[in-house]
Image: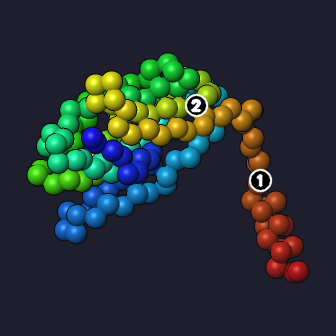
Amino acid sequence: MIRCQIALLAKNIVRDSETNSISVFHIIENFKSVSFPVFIPEISFFAHLIRGEDDPDVIESLLDIAINELEIISIPAKADFQGKFANRLTVRVEGLAIPKPGILTVNLRHGDTILAHYDVSVESVGKPRAEVRSDEAMEEMLGEEKNR
């Protein structure tokens, strides 16, 4: 039976071609937005999968992303173990529109079996906030800090 040792979402996941090591940048634990839909230009999913001796060498699966059970996207994802018992699957999604706040659910699914699962809270944070400062105000602020 295939099992997942770790699953996560990040802004970027890179595999070094020389060392074959994986680097994960900016793990995503939640999203906050002032308006919806919110557009995420790039996001990556990672799953470290382990297979048993009786499991197939190649697993055809789907990466399903949904918000509050509303499907956003379903992407084919093939895990080729190449005769080994572990596979580090990465799926890069370019352009993800999240239509509303809620729980963003990411499932790696093989048939009816969920191989990996990751949830992210998507929150509305109200109105945008902006602070405008002129060059003079910045110089005054910096001058006050220097005199302290």
Q: Describe the element under mark 1 as helix, strand or loop.
A: loop
* Residue under label 1: 133
The one of 108 and 43 positioned closer to us in this rendering:
108
Which quadrant is home to the C terminus?
A: bottom right
Q: Which mark is residue 64?
A: none
Q: How far separated are the C-alphas under marks 1 and 2?
A: 37 Å
Q: Which residue is mark 2?
A: 103
Q: Is 126 or 106 nearer to us in this picture?
A: 106
The kind of residue on which mark 1 rests is Arg
**Dot 2: within a 10 Å radius of its alpha carbon, few (fewer than 14), some, or many (20 or more) residues?**
some
Position in image of residue 25 (x %, y %): 44, 57
Is there any visible trace of residue 42 in the rendered image?
no
Classify mark 1: residues with Cα within 10 Å, few (<14), some (14-19) or many (20+): few
Q: Report the side of 88 relative to 125 (left or right).
A: left
Residue in the image at 32% along x and 56% along y: 14
> Which residue is more in the foreground, 71 or 108?
108
Q: Which element is circle 2 on?
A: strand
Query: Is the residue 22 above or below the residue 8 in the image?
Result: below
Q: Earlier in the sequence, mark 1 or mark 2?
A: 2
In the drawing, does residue 89 fall left or right of residue 33?
Answer: left
> Front-most of 26 and 37?
26
Rendered position, 10 above or below 140: above
Q: List x then y, in percent, for residue 88.
A: 28, 52
**Which quadrant is home to the N terminus?**
top left
Farthest residue toward the bottom?
147
Amino acid of disc 2: Ile
Q: Residue at x 22, y 47 (%)?
A: 52
Looking at the rendering, which quadrant does residue 35 occupy? top right
Horizontal and vertical percent position of residue 19: 22, 69
Looking at the image, residue 89 lies above or below residue 74 = below
For the point 79% across and 71% down, the residue is 142
* Image depth: mark 1 or mark 2 in front: 2
